[in-house]
Amino acid sequence: MEEKKINLLVVDDEESFLTPISKRLGVRGFNVIPVTRGEMALEVARQQPIDIALVDLKMPGMNGEETLAALKKEHPWMEVVILTGHGSIESATELAKSGAYSYLQKPCEMDRLLEVLTAAYKKKVMNKLKIKEDRMNELLEFSQFGSPLAILQKIRDLDK
Amino acid sequence: MAFEPSETRPAGPPAAAAADAAAKPHDASKERFARLRRRLVVGMLAAFITPILVLSYYFHFQLRYSLTESGKLHLLALAESQRNTIDLFLQERVFNIFSLFYSAGFSLRPNELAMQTCLQNLRQMSDAFIDVGFFNQSGIQVGYAGPFAFLHGRDYSRETWFLSLNQQGRNYYISDIYLGFRNKPHFTIAVKQVIDGKPLIIRATLDPDKFYIFLHSISSEKGVGSYLINEQGYYQVAGPELGKVMEKSTYTPLSRVESGVDERSVEGDKILKAFTRLKETPWILVVRQPLSIAYARMYRARTIIIAATAVIIVAFTLAIWLIVRRLIDEAEATAQSREELRYQLIHAAKLASVGELAAGVAHEINNPLQIISANAGVIRDFFDPDLKLTPTPEGIAAELDQIDTAVFRARNITKKLMDYARKYEPRLSRTNVNQLLDEVVGGLKEREFATANIQLIRDYDPGLPELMLDRDELGQVFLNLINNAGDSIVAAGRGGTITLSTRRDNEHVRIAVMDTGPGMEPELMKKIFLPFFTTREVGKGTGLGLPVSLSIVESMGGAIEVQSVPGSGSSFTIVLSIKNTEAANDEDRTKEPAAT
């Protein structure tokens, strides 16, 4: 069975970052759609189904907060993770209120990124399928030593 | 940050030129303070000393008047008291002679012995008596006792005293000094008594010298000399140093005034003379005292006033000089510390801006870092067994190139930060303003504006002269104004235009940054140069950009003009004086190879 890839929208004005991160996430089972502007992100989200979004805060034009708010408004199931080069506790809580799933600081280790993306995707699936969390864990037979990739695999299977 | 500070900084001569440029305002200010010091001292001295001099002169004047008056009055009182004593003396002598008429053994035809007795009596009363004589009504001296025996029997009927005595009502007569038959100066007291209807006269003569001794004894005050003159001014009784008896004195007192006092000059010495008329004789008592003694108190007071005034003036001068020196030293120190504060403000503003940039810097540096991390991660993925990828040398090399690029980018940013924060003295170099403007907006800034929908218009004066100034500082000012313009347009939200224009205007160079932002109300315009005033949100601006820019421009001898129309936009114009900043011609060229 063809594996379904997770549709990940990455929004960052830094092209030199988009390219390698797309490559790395691409080989880990994500269908990465890189865009450099918030407005472009909205356009793409309207045209294709997007599961999770990874959004940078500081961008010219529409900035990260505005993009987050707009995406959440138009696509309530989509989970948005904020990835930013600067920040503080206040901004983190503000973003959480606006609907961000999580908040990561650059530069970020791949494992941590993967962990957060996985959790975001899990939440998305949960919400979509209206499954409670403990039931979800049961379904996943969640194990401490399972690699994020494997977990991702299992969630994807559920999501079909 | 698109603005690059100049890379090469030649040390030596330009630094010296910069030091000179810094020294020039310092010297000017030192000279200004020296001038201020002089003016203050002179002004305060004049202000203090003039009233003191006026007052002390006034006091001296008043004092002199009152003390000399008191000296005069004192001498006059002395004269009058002496006069009373003299009058009394004469009255006593008259009485002495009177009493002869009533003494025991008085007879109408006195013999020698009787006369001798009379003389003895008289001489007991006063040793001024020389002789005594008894006269019958025809004026013949029928009785005589005294040193001039030849006078016995003389006819005095035509003598003045005899005639006067017989004619006048008063029964005694005192004569002036005269030589008489004996040819020696003497004066006469003659007393007339009518006995049995016949006028009888007893007359005694007195020695003026002895009278003088008496006179001398009653003037006991220092420096006082007294003498007697008659109405015509002839000495009657006088000491040898004062005048020769029977000679005319140079002093003629006021007639018709009973007593008086005035200053005279006798042989170059100033003398105070008081005169008063005797009652018993038509003589005038003259009492003299040298001014130096009569006015001694006044002289002493005057000396004290002058000395005190001099001391006060010296003391004041010293005090004023010390006070002014202290004040000016403080003022100089304050001015200097203000200059230092100004430098520190610029420096602090830079550091604060660095703080402001910290957030931006975290982003600026984190971006390259994440790129490096991501690229390194791609390489790692190539060798991850789980992922089953096929690495190629070209693929790896490509990632490594990306890493290098990011590293250089980060290094540039840190370097710019360091340059920005480093404190340095203004370093002057020949600057083409148009070029500097282009540098500041060039590259990143221009693209930023483009993406923000801000159009950039350049309107440069091609004939703008090169100016001697610190490129980095002026560049910082440009960046500040341009950023403000950009931010105000972005805040309005609808895009706009920034116009950079340069113009030469006689003595000045005008560099204007105009924006089509929302503009400012007059109230706001007043505040924008206040330190720490900002219209941005908390944490997004230090409020130091404009104050520091203003400070920099002012330290170049220039100014910033602001115009704004709410709704249309604002314009900030840097005005620099060509004189202050003109690139000096040949000296500079030889000192400094092109540093730009």
Image: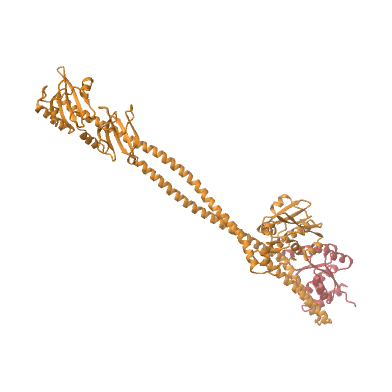
Quadrant in the picture for residue B404: bottom right
Outermost right residue: A1
Residue B428 in sight from this viewpoint? no
Left or right: residue A108 versus residue B51 is right
The image's colouring method is by chain
Camera sees residue B315: yes
Colour in which the image shows chain A: red
Q: Quadrant of the C terminus of chain B?
A: bottom right
Q: Which image quarter: residue B338?
A: bottom right
Q: Using residue B336 as the reference point, say whether residue B484 is left or right of it.
A: right
Name the spot of residue A72 as percent of width and height, x first.
82, 64
Above or below, B497 relative to A92: above
Hue of chain B? orange
Q: Nearer the viewer, residue B103 or B250?
A: B250
* Residue B591 image offset from top left, x and y in percent: 66, 67
Q: Which residue is nearer to you in this view: B466 or A40? A: B466
**B163 relative to B587, above or below:** above
**Extreme-top residue of the structure:** B197
- Frontmost residue, B560 versus B13: B13
- Residue A136, by quadrant, is bottom right
Q: Estimate the x, y position of residue B231 in percent, counting from the top left.
A: 29, 28
Residue B326 in picture, x, y percent from top left: 51, 55
| Number of numbered markers | 0
Q: Quadrant of the N terminus of chain B?
A: bottom right
